[in-house]
Image (spheres, coloured by chain):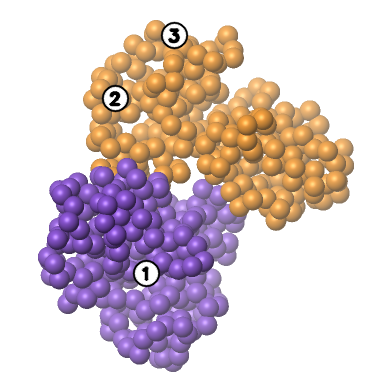
Chain colours: A orange, B purple
């Protein structure tokens, strides 16, 4: 029995998120189905990040155990021939039997939130950006963003339905930059609470349009009160860029 | 009766191109339906460019005549509330009664062809780029591209099914540049033959991977022989960026 680690990219538009659920088709479900069909076993992958409905990934991670004889690094290729074209296995590799994509000592996750900021929406960007028609002040967004860097109790930056008591996380870095006609918020941390990046994006959009002062980010952080959906930026702007395991295997 | 000019953007993925046809839904059909429903008249738009199935636009142009009392510049707003979200009216304005989007003295059209050049396809780019896994040499693509600039008989750069005898066109400018992880061929000209930009892109991709020398572009041009589909780059990489009418209205 070998444990295989997959790096998975997807356009999440057509999926009800990562995790299997009764209301619609999910990434996890497609992976289980196609890997089972490839190996002839009944495969259940374990994923690193349960991304929400409509959220994308360029580097989500999943593992599964198999007896199949396909060389580990060829599994990506074999799977990509079966996958729908909005899910791509970027890489496959063997890891040790006890390697788990969520329970590692050191994990760094990187997300990007993409905003299309113009008078009129761009139909070619509607699946991969949030559209904001108010002009956004990037400098003010940067000032506001600076307050989330470091170890904080992010209770105010998670959804009321967050299923954990430990709301302390560390944000290593956050940048706000203009890339052609998009504004991209890029954030690295040791983990993110439910909706945390989308709430940070939602608050920074309010800062960018002048509805909040940059210091409001600090005030919200200090409130430590879980958030209703109102300020949460929409899912299509969010991409899980990748997960770094410093102590891999 | 007033003539209204629309600037139209769309993600062409789900459409059988611009022009109405029996096999599937088209951009023209949606425009006719939604404008007719808005004004209560039976509207038939006249389009500038009949883009192919799967091809996108940020600035295609169409006109229609109407008796409706909505201020011309508000028609875009009213239509966008009815349009599917992959078609957006960027602008609406009144033009003179005899203004025609194809028959003007001076027209400059700008297209871009987007290539995603990497080992593994990116599912978030699959609708808007052509995927090429062979490494492409941009410098050689630029050398090859230079041969198409100027007034030429582009017979070799049109499809065998091209419905015209006059295959002379002028390319004003062509650039090949790297934009993040995409290679973008941008081309401006006074008009383009059927599949012309996609054939130029297909030939330049062959140059970029070393299959053709850059001088081959000149040789193909000199052959003046219409082309089978083989070398035509796929539709999803192509975007009609815009149409400039120097003697507008």
Identify the subunit bearing mark 1. Answer: B
Q: Which label is found at residue B50?
A: 1
Mark 2 or mark 3: name the one nearer the start of the chain: 2
Q: Is residue B7 above or below residue A187?
A: below
Asked where in the image residue A113 lies, by quadrant, the reply is top left
Q: Quadrant of the N terminus of chain A?
A: top right
List x then y, in percent, for residue A199.
Answer: 43, 23
- On the image, numbered disc 3 is attached to which residue? A225
List x then y, in percent, for residue A193.
Answer: 53, 20
Measured Cα–Cα span from mark 2 to mark 3: 19 Å
Measured Cα–Cα span from mark 1 to mark 2: 43 Å
Residue shown at the point (25%, 51%) measured from the top left: B39
Residue shown at the point (32%, 51%) measured from the top left: B37
Disc 1 + disc 2, Cβ < 8 Å? no
Residue shown at the point (38%, 26%) measured from the top left: A202
List x then y, in percent, for residue B162.
Answer: 42, 83
**Residue B67 appears in the figure:** yes
Q: Are marks 2 and 3 on the same chain?
A: yes
Q: Which label is found at residue A148?
A: none
- On the image, numbered disc 2 is attached to which residue? A207
């Amino acid at each position: 029995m070998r444990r295989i680690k997959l790096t998975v990219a997807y356009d999440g538009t057509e999926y009800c998120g990562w995790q299997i659920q009764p209301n619609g088709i999910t990434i996890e479900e497609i992976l289980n189905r196609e890997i089972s069909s490839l190996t002839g076993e009944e495969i259940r992958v374990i994923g690193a990040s349960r991304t929400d409905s409509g959220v994308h990934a360029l580097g989500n991670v999943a593992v599964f155990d198999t007896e199949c004889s396909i060389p580990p690094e060829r599994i990506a290729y074999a799977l990509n021939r079966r996958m729908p074209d909005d899910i791509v296995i970027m890489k496959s590799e063997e890891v040790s039997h006890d390697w788990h994509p969520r329970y590692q000592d050191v994990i760094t996750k990187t997300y990007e939130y993409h905003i299309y900021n113009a008078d009129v929406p761009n139909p070619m960007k509607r699946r991969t950006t949030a559209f904001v028609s108010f002009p956004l002040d990037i400098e003010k967004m940067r000032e506001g963003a600076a307050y989330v860097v470091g170890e904080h109790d992010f209770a105010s930056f998670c959804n009321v339905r967050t299923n954990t008591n430990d709301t302390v996380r560390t944000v290593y870095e956050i940048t706000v930059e203009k890339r052609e006609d998009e504004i991209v918020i890029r954030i690295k941390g040791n983990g993110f609470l439910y909706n945390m990046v989308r709430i940070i994006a939602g608050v920074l959009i309010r800062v960018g349009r002048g509805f909040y002062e940059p210091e409001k980010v600090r005030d919200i952080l200090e409130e430590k009160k879980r958030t209703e959906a109102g300020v949460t930026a929409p899912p299509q702007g969010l991409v899980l860029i990748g997960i770094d395991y410093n102590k891999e295997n």
